[in-house]
Image: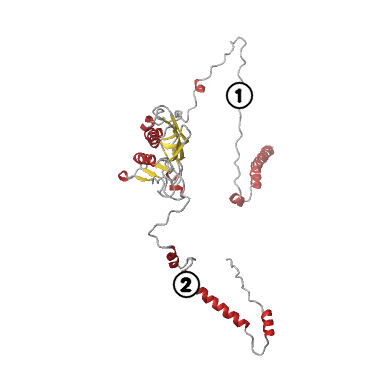
Amino acid sequence: MNCSAEKSSRKSTYGAFGRTGTALVTAVAILLGMLAEPAMAARRSAPFPWADLFGPPRPKPRGTVHRAAVPLPKPRPAEAPALKPEPPAAAEKAPPADNGKAAEKPPEPAPPPQPSACRQALTEEIAIAPSVPAIHGNGGCGGEDLVRLEAIVLPDKRQVAVKPAAILRCTMATAIADWVRTDIAPLAAGLGGTISELDNLDSFQCRGRNGVAGAQLSEHGRANALDVRAFKLANGRSISFTDRTVPRDLRESMLHSACTRFSTVLGPGSDGYHEDHIHLDRMERRNNYRICQWDVWDPLPATAPLLPAERPEQAPPREVAAKNDPKSDAKTDPKTDAKSDAKTNTKSDASKSEDTKPEAGRSDGAVSKRAATKPQPTKKRRQSRRP
């Protein structure tokens, strides 16, 4: 009995343990299978090892973003007062600063240059000469302190028009005005009239001397010269500075006054370019050197002579002069002419006798017939040869 009971108790105990152990093993196997399945899946999905070395980099997976719910504001109570619009901020009114730097102010315009002493002295009581902006051209042309000389005001307030108006430096315009007011106006009054106009041939022009290309810059290019041709009187009469019909003493007076006031005076006989006008300038040279080249020619005769002048007594006779000249076609001595005529007459008679002499063995009729049929010699005309 005891043995059987003990066996049955052991059997039941082992059987219970066996079922429990089997269940534990199964559970452990299932758990291990669940854990190994993701690893196997990751191993199957893993690329070839070389792809990690030569393939493009793959983006890393990001974690899940958990967004928290934003609480909404509570509704405004009905009994709350109404809101008023806020005034604009002071920062909006102020101009924006550039990186903390104050805004730069625009540069102020330069003050106008002060007029020179010459410009202040050349008033409307002396000349009508408005200022002209400075000219700065190529090669040193132009200058500063320029004026446009339109008219010269005489001491009696009458004006002498400068036609056309001259562009000059202020100092040159002042010298022209003083010359006309002090010297030319009294000379014109001596002719029985008053000066009313000054004929301006040339003033400012950017060119070389005498208009030659490549020559040294003329004083005309520096607005420091004036070419005058004549001055007109109120009665319409024109007095030219180079007219030989104008009295010589008047032209000499104009010459002396011009050479006293200007450093360069060029007129007829100077260089061939100033035969019909006078050139005036104020060129500065060393030691105050001046040039005054103006030939005052003698006046022309009132009427041209119709007959040639009488032959002077000391002149040789005309026959002797023609004989000594080998190229002259004048007649020679009459004695020699007679001798030469006699020689030519004897030669012509001999030739005629030879032509009419009968030949031997022929009758006079044959000779006369031959003489009649013989062609007469004709002179050949010399043809003119043109080149």
Specify few, some or many for label 2: CA neighbours under 10 Å numbering under 14, 14-19, or 20 or more.
Answer: few
- The mark lying in front, picked from 1 and 2, is 2
Q: Of 139 and 271, which appears nearest the observer?
A: 271
Across and down, in percent, residue 201 comes to: 46, 41
User: Disc 1 marks which amino acid?
Assistant: Val
Where, by quadrant of the figure, is residue 283 drawn?
A: top left
Location of the C terminus by quadrant is: bottom right
User: Disc 2 marks which amino acid?
Assistant: Thr
Specify few, some or many for label 1: CA neighbours under 10 Å numbering under 14, 14-19, or 20 or more.
Answer: few
Where, by quadrant of the figure, is residue 141 drawn?
A: top left
Q: Of 284 and 138, which appears nearest the observer?
A: 284
**Is 7 displayed left or right of 241 in the figure?**
right
Q: Is residue 156 above or below residue 60?
A: above
Residue farthest to the top, as pictured: 79
Residue topped by disc 1: 70
Dots 1 and 2: beta carbons under 8 Å? Answer: no
Across and down, in percent, residue 192 comes to: 42, 32
Location of the N terminus by quadrant is: top right
Q: Of 194 and 18, which appears nearest the observer?
A: 194
**Is 357 displayed left or right of 159 in the figure?**
right
Question: Which mark, by number, is residue 336?
Answer: 2
Can residue 226 be seen?
Answer: no
Query: What is the secondary structure assignment of the residue under circle 1?
Result: loop
Question: Which mark, by number, is residue 355?
Answer: none
Disc 1 versus disc 2: distance between alpha carbons? Answer: 156 Å
